[in-house]
Amino acid sequence: MSASTSQRVQKSFLKYQHVFVFLAPITFVAAVFFAAPLPAEAGDGYWLRYWWLFPFFLLGATIVNTVGISGSALFVPFLIFIFPVLVPYMAPETILSTPFGPSTIVKVSLISESFGLSSSALAFIQYGLVDRRLALTIVGGSIPFVVGGALLSFIIPEPIFHGLLGLALLAASFLLVRADLGHEEPGGADADDDAAVEADGGPDLPNDRGKPGAAGVATDSEGVVTRVDREGSDYNYGRGGYLERFANYSIGGIFQGLAGFGSGELGIISMLRTSIPVRVAIGTNHIVVAATAVLASLVHVFGGGLVGGHSIDLATTPWNIVVWTVPATVTGGQIAPYVSAALDTEYLKKGVGVLFAVIATALFIMASGGIL
């Protein structure tokens, strides 16, 4: 495929990304309904049993995508604490003699998060706020840590899992409250300036034939990046600080695989500390977290047999849950930008941070009880 043809396909895909975003969960649900192996106890009403999870995951996905963190940071605690309480009332025919194990909880959260983050990430690509070079290097460096964390979830004792999850949430709470995620004003292009930049087709637009989305990007001989978003706002930054980002995303990658979140929370801090503009950092971070969530969810579905966990038995996945949570997270990912524009996200961010601290405390209590 020639470069021009590839660019036309890319531009058309991004132009109609809303269509593809909503076709993805429909295709997923259809494939699961007709092809997924079901557990032996599945009977009448199997697929409708957890319809009531849709509004909970819709709300959760909207919140996390508005703030810019991993969906599993809310989904995993919900499945640990709230889900078992609601089941006797909402699905009385379901018998949960024991709650889902850690690997199943994280699996459901990761599958749901993967769709929601991918939905939101496409919007950032379309807007021109993704640095693909940063994203590719971070994802590449995170792969072994994400896979290792995901495999660890199959063999780690449940009390230790709860304790580590509590630590991750406590760290996420601290970082979220401390982080300045305010959208600073980008640099404006002066029409009389020879270095002025314009969006999509202007005479001085930085050009990169491989760029995603409608914006332009150019890198000068000193490594300074000039990025122009869809509306013509320009951002100038350097890509230095790879070691700090690698360290943060490595630790975050382990927790991403183990608990379903971590990369987003630690990653956004490392990008801001290395002087990546906030809007570019959030957009690029969505791509990284979406890619690592997809990778981790694949390991959780197929990788248990590699470390003595469950064998490759797709029937162990609660498909009647994900058929409702996946469409919910995709919808939440599309709603989030509008919520972000309408609300003061600073209050939402601090509220989520306090909620994380409360959940972490409960997890520490559970962990200490399990160990003692």
Image (spheres, grey):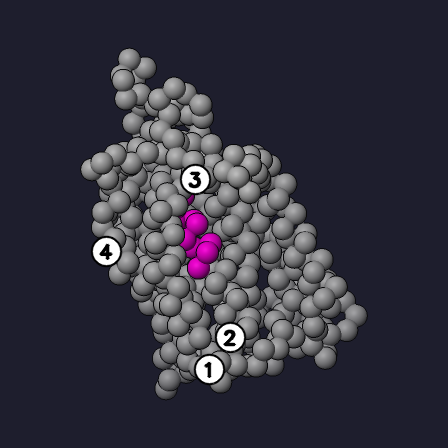
Chain part drawn in magenta: 283-292
- Going from N to C along the chain, the mark reached first, 1 or 4, is 4
Instruction: Identify the image quadrant of residue 280.
Output: top left
In the picture, the disc for residue 244 is 4
Kind of residue indicated by mark 2: Gly
Q: Main secondary structure of the magenta part?
A: helix
Q: Position of residue 37 (x, y in %)?
A: 70, 72
In the picture, the disc for residue 307 is 1
Please identify the quadrant where the N terminus is shown: top right
Q: Position of residue 271 (x, y in %)?
A: 29, 48
Q: Position of residue 105 (x, y in %)?
A: 52, 69
Residue depicted at x 72% and y 79%? 40
- Going from N to C along the chain, the mark reached first, 4 or 2, is 4
> Do the residues bearing badges 1 and 3 touch, measured as CB atoms within 8 Å?
no
Kind of residue indicated by mark 1: Val
Residue annotated with mark 2: 303
Q: Between residues 219 and 197, which one lies in front from this camera angle?
A: 219
> Do the residues bearing badges 2 and 1 touch, measured as CB atoms within 8 Å?
yes
Residue depicted at x 69% and y 77%? 39
Residue furthest top in the image: 192
289 in magenta: yes
Callout 3: few (<14), some (14-19), or many (20+) C-alpha neighbours within 10 Å? few
- Going from N to C along the chain, the mark reached first, 1 or 3, is 3
Kind of residue indicated by mark 4: Glu
Kind of residue indicated by mark 3: Gly
